[in-house]
Each structure stands twice: as structure tokens, then as C-alpha cells.
Image (spheres, helix red, strand yellow):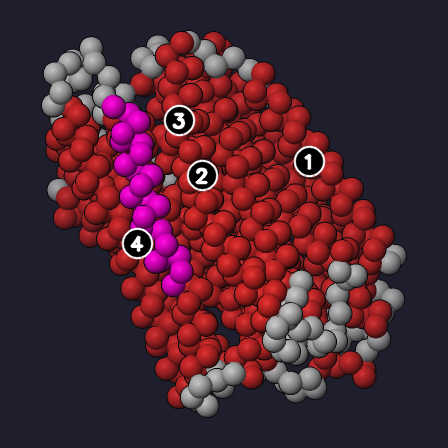
Amino acid sequence: MSSVSAWLIVLALVLIAFIYIFANYQKIKKMSEGTADMIELSGIIRSGSQTFLKTEFKSIGIIVAVLAIVFTLFIEKTSGITFILGALMSSIVCVLGMSSATYANVRTANKARESLSIGETVKVALCGGSISGLSVQAFGMFGLVLVLLIFNGVSHEAVGSGLVANLQCNPTIMRISTYSLGCSIVAMFNRVAGGNYTKAADISADILGKIRHDLPEDDSRVPNTIADFIGDNVNDIAGNCSDLLESFVATMSATIMIAVTLFAQNGPSVTEATFTATTLFPIIIAAAGLVGCLLGLGYAQLKKMGDNPSRELNMASWISAGLTIVIGLVAAYLVFSKVTLYADFKFGWISPWLSSVLGIASGIAIGSITEYYTSTDFKPTKILAGFAEEGEAFVVTKGDAIGSRSCLAPILVIGVSLLISGKICGEYGIALSALGMLAFVGATVSIDAFGPIADNAGGIAESCHLDPEVRVITDKLDAVGNTTAAIGKGFAIGSAAFATVSLIVAYVGNFAHNGTEPVLNFASFIVVAGGLIGGALVEYFSAMLTDNTIDSAKLMADEGDKMLSIPGVLEGTVKPDYNKMIAMAASEALRKMVIPSMLAIAIPIVGGLLFGVQFVGGLLVGATVCAIPRAIFMGNSGGAFDNAKKYIEGGNIPGHGKGSDAHKAAVTGDTVGDTRKDVVGVALDIFIKMMSTVANTLAPIFSNITLFK
């Protein structure tokens, strides 16, 4: 089978996914929104979310346009187009995911109101989530395959140049890396701005409702609550979609770039057919994952669900992963069985498939480990809830210990998987292991998006004063959603680790000379210095995001207090100025997103131009080594804090329900955890991926232009 035929088949599969997405979107929109109050509130949430994204995209658009011109003029004349295409694909996914979620949230609440059935309500939330998940995989593949088709596939010749500069580079690598970088730009801005928006609103709402005024959760009298509903969509949906799309695209891109490097090193000993096979297989594995996701999510939509939907949701993931493995095996045989293989392929044609399976298994294992440390079904979170009786200091200290303890197991999984993949299939195997983990990302994101939709549905039920039985149903869904969201964050961080390692391997290959082994010299003081600075920058980036969020939360809490002091607001006879609070949240988030986001672009550029490729390599390794455990710590401690609070609210600690001292101590822990899991933890993975993508894009420049050699 030729490359063009394979790409056309992949495009046909993507088209089927587009039809499935469109059908679910129309299905959601046709459902009833419920009462007049529900329609009004959902309209505010939808309008606020759309306004935020429109304003954010104006800022992103300017930066994308400027960088596209720079790439076209000075690096490779077509790379500006592919850079814009990547940003466009990511933006479309953000808009689709957020739009579907803001339609699905109120319809989920209304289905609970009308049916009082958990099973029927789950399907509405999952239908909305599947639009997000499948969009990530379908649009990510669509853009990359378009790049390959339009520009005649993958070349191993270094012939490209910009319109002004005459920089020799591989045009294929430049197009693929700039496509990936376009996705990264949108992801970084979304995560930084969305995280600030949602957590500033959430923390300020908790301060006002639970601490200062002792009001119920999601009480519509607190204007910050409505901003929090919007934040769930702009961060947990739009931000998460762009985050995972960027990881998915980055791993496909890194695998193709490594294939180019391998051929450059071993060209005389292998044929063009081998080169074609190694560049084609990553796209086929991704397509196999898309088929698996369509069937797995289709199963969940058709299957009748009972009062515990977790089993069916987990089964959808297992079906998606299982089909990816089976189809991937067939694809590996068809692609590699009749071509000359590299010496690194220790088990012949099956080696690439084994590497991808290791990635899939790692993704499932990391999700299970995350669930253990954050779910109310297991000891760590139950023990943490018990410590709340002793006060805030005990909660925070114990939560920190849980977060730190939770780092070892997932990092062991990542490390062992990378070691075995490298032994089985060399550098190419490492990249395929990363891609395997993300091959069924459509199902992962779909089930993850279920969480914020269910959370929003519960908030709408509370704010619109629906029957208490409705809130019982949405709370059960929210509990399931908390677990799926925690697993999703663990998956995002784990996939970022795999993606970044594969990008670093690709980066070293990009600056190595043809025929020489790619080496990053850790005995060099330049590399060590880069590593130390990279690690320190991770801490600085984390502090910057935390400061920005807490500062915004303080301003919003004070503004919310002023509104609650207006006569009639606390009594429920006068509505607070929701639009003012929403505008404040958006303004603060957008104002504070530029500097942290630009750091990830500027750091490798400045480092590379000043000290060269080896320094940037050390920078990437140091940042990755520090960021991965930090991100896992942040995500898991934050998830444990959140669910410990919910465990107490569920009446599981006798004598310590809502409003008790233990509950207030748990709320403090949850407030600490909010910034960790939804701002810092999720932004760190994009920080290291984006730096690695920038480094890959500019490696030819760093190789030729270094101020201090």
C-alpha cells in the first residue's frame, strides 16, 4: 500500500468521526433545556464561555500571525502555513468542545429532573463529552495528514529555506514541528488563562459561600459561582481538549521526525521502503486508535447503564485500548513484515507494535494509580478526610504526603516502559510508546469531559432550586466525574512525560550530523548548567501561576462581598451583577496569561542563540525531570484534597458533615488543592512540551547561530 492510499483511508476514517461528532452535536441541541430558570442560567454560562474564548483568540491570533511570518521569512517558506493550520485545528477543537459542553450541562440536569435515572442522565453527559474527545483525535489527525498530502509526504533531504534567510533544514521536519507548535501555542494560552479563570472563580466562591457567609455550595446568590460554572468549561473542557490534542500531535510528529533521523544515520543499509514504513506507521496506529474510540464510545452510548456507570465508562476505555492493540498488530505486520528493518528492531516486524502496547499499558496503569490516590473508594483519600477532624494544618500536611508518595509509582511505570521500548525498538520505539499511550485519546478525553459537564449540571440543579432528588443524581455523577477527571489529569501528565521524552530524542537527532549518532553530552558543563536552569524555571513558572490565581481570587472575593452586601441579594430578592463578575474573571485571566505563556517560547530561543544546542538539550532534560514529579504531586494532592472534602460532605465521617469544623478544614485543603490540580499541574506538562517543540523547530538555527560557542 502506498503512503498516499494509506493517508486517504485515514482521511475517510476521520470523515466518519466528523459525522459521528456532528450527529451527537445535533442530538444534544435537540434535547430540552428544562425550566425558564435553567434556560436563563445556561444561556449566561454559554455566553460567558463564548465571550472569553473570542477575546482570548484575538490575543492568540496576533501572536500566531507574527510567528507565522517569522517562520516563513527566516526558517522555511511553507512552515508559517503549517503553523497556522496547527493553531486552527486546536482552536476548532476548543470551540467545539466548549460549545457542546455548554449545551450538554443543562440538558444533563434536565434529564435528571425528568427521568430521575442515573443511567439515562449519564448518557447525556457522555454524549456531550464524546464530541470533545473525538474532536481532539479527529482534528489532530486531519491537520497532520493534510500537511503530508499537500506537501508530498515525508522527505529525508535537507533542502528547505525561508523567503529571506537561506537556512538549510529538512522542510518536512519543519512543517511537522511547526504544525505541532501551532497546537502548542493555543494549548498553553488556554491552560494558563483558563486555569486562572476557573480557579480564581472557584476559590473566591468557596471563600464567600463556605467561609465568610456559610451558604450552600453553588448558591446562585454568590456571583462568583456563575463565573466558576463558566470556568469549568473554558479550562476543564477547552483547555483539556487543546492540551491532549497537543500531546497527541506532538507524539505523532516526534515519531516521524525520529524516522527521518534514523534513515539519515542508516541510509546505506536500508531501503526507501523502510523509510516509508517508519513514517507511515505512526499515522496508522493513530487511525487504529480512532476506530477503537468510535466503537468503544458507541458501546457506551448503546449500553443500558445502571446506578453505577463507572463500569460502563471503564469498559468503553478498555474496548478502545483493546481494539487499538489488535488493529495495531495487523498494521505492524502489513507495514513492516516485507521491508528491511533497522538493527534496533530486536524482535523484527513486531517490535514497533510491542513498543506501542507498552505505551497503552502504561496509560492504563497510570490512570489506575491516580484513581487509587485520589478516589474516595480507596484508603489515601479516606485517611485524609479523617485527619480533617484535627484541623487545617493536618489536612494540608497529610495531603502533601499523599501527593509526594503518589509520584513514585507512575514515574516507575514511565521509566520502565521507556527503558523496555528503547531496548525493543530503539529511539523509534520510545516515540511509539508515547504514541501508543495517546492512540485512544478520543475515549480518554470523552470520559474526562464527562466530569465537568456533570459538575456543571449539579451546579445548575442547585442554582435553579430543582428537586433535591435531582441534586442527589447529579452529585453521584459528579463523584464519578471527579474520579474520571483525576484519572484524566494523570493521563495528561503521563502522556506529557512520554511526549516530551520522544521530542527530546527527536531534538537531539535534528541537530546531529548525518551518519553520526545523536548524543547529548551530560559530562559537559554546558548541558549540566542547562539542566539546573531548566529545573529552576519549572519552580518559577509554578510560582508565577499560583501567584496570579490567588491574586485574582482575592480581588474577586472582595468584589463578590460588595455585591452580597447590596440589600436584597442575600435574601434572594435581588440578583447580583453576574456579568460584572464574569467580565472581571475574564479580564484578570487574559491579562495574566501572556508572560507565563511566552516564557515557554522565549526560554529555548534565548538559551539556544546564546549557548547552543547542547545547552538547550540540558534545559529540556532538567525541566522535564523536575516538572513530571511536580505535576503528578500537584494533580494527585489536589485531587485527594477535593475528594476528601466531598467524602465528608457525603456524611461518611460520623458527626462531621457540612458546616462542621472538619468540613471547613477540608474546604481549606480543597482551596489549596484547586490551584495545584487545575492550574499548575496541568500547565506544567504543556510548559515542557512547548519548550521541546520550540527547540525541535529551531534546532537548525541553534546549530548554525550561537553567540557564545
- Kindly identify which residue carries mark 4: 545
Q: Nearer the viewer, residue 671 or 509?
A: 509
Residue sitting at x 71%, y 48%: 287
Main secondary structure type of the part rendered in magenta: helix
Q: Nearer the viewer, mark 1 or mark 2?
A: 2
Q: Please provide the residue range marked out in magenta.
A: 577-599
Q: Earlier in the sequence, mark 1 or mark 3?
A: 1
Q: Which SS class for mark 2? A: helix
Q: Which residue is the site of mark 2?
A: 53
Q: Which numbered tag is attached to residue 440? A: none
Q: Which of pointers 1 and 2 lies earlier in the amino acid sequence?
A: 1
Using a 10 Å C-alpha cutoff, classify the residue at mark 4 as few (fewer than 14 neighbours), some (14 to 19) or many (20 or more): many
The amino acid marked with disc number 1 is Phe
Query: Residue 369: where, in percent of width, then height?
Result: 44, 50
Q: State the residue at coordinates (74%, 73%).
A: 156
Instruction: Say which residue label 3 marks.
Output: 45
Report the residue marked by disc 1: 18
Examine the rendered structure and indicate whether residue 505 appears above or below residue 519: above
Q: Alpha carbon of mark 1 to alpha carbon of mark 4: how far?
A: 36 Å
At horizontal 69% and vertical 73% (from top left) the residue drawn is 160
Of the residues tagged 3 and 2, which is closer to the observer? 2
Q: Is residue 583 magenta?
A: yes
